[in-house]
Image (cartoon, rainbow, N blue to C red):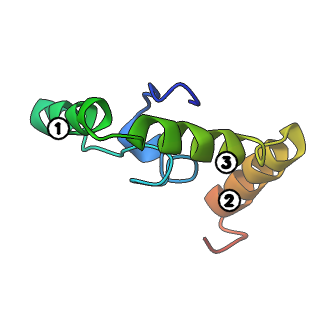
Amino acid sequence: MSRGCNGCGWRGCWRLVKNEKNGFVVPEKDSRALNEAIGRILDADGLHKRLSESADEEIKKWTYERQAHGFLDAIEYSLGNRQP
């Protein structure tokens, strides 16, 4: 992620990738939007560095404990025991 070349499914990005802060979220199967996002990274002075630095900060927050709690929350939600 910190290299500015993260890829993930549209539905899986919302917690990790903050659009235009640490990367770009583009709609699934939208090659035009993907091309525009890559073009912005290549063309804008300092954008790649800013996105990379922000991505480094964001990924430091993602510990194994946080991931485990998120997984348990998802199970509770799917069982109807918790609201989103």
**Against 84, is 3 above or below?**
above
58, 79: nearer the viewer: 58
> Tag 1, which secondary structure?
helix
Q: Which mark is nearer the camera, 1 or 2?
A: 1
Q: Which label was assigned to residue 58?
A: 3
Residue 48 sits in quarter: top left
Q: Which residue is mark 2?
A: 79
Going by the image, does 29 lie left or right of 65?
A: left
* Residue found at the far front of this picture: 45
In terms of secondary structure, where does tag 2 sit? Answer: loop
Q: Which mark is residue 36?
A: 1
Q: Which quadrant of the rendered structure holds the N terminus? A: top right
Q: Amino acid at mark 1?
A: Glu
Please name the amino acid that badge 3 sits on.
Glu
Percent coordinates x, y for residue 8 in the rendering = 44, 31
Question: Looking at the image, which is closer to me, 28 or 39?
Answer: 39
Callout 2: 10 Å neighbours few (<14), some, many (20+)?
few
Toward the right, the furthest residue is 65
The image shows residue 28 at horizontal and vertical percentages of 25, 37
> Considering depth in this image, is 65 or 25 the residue closer to the camera?
25
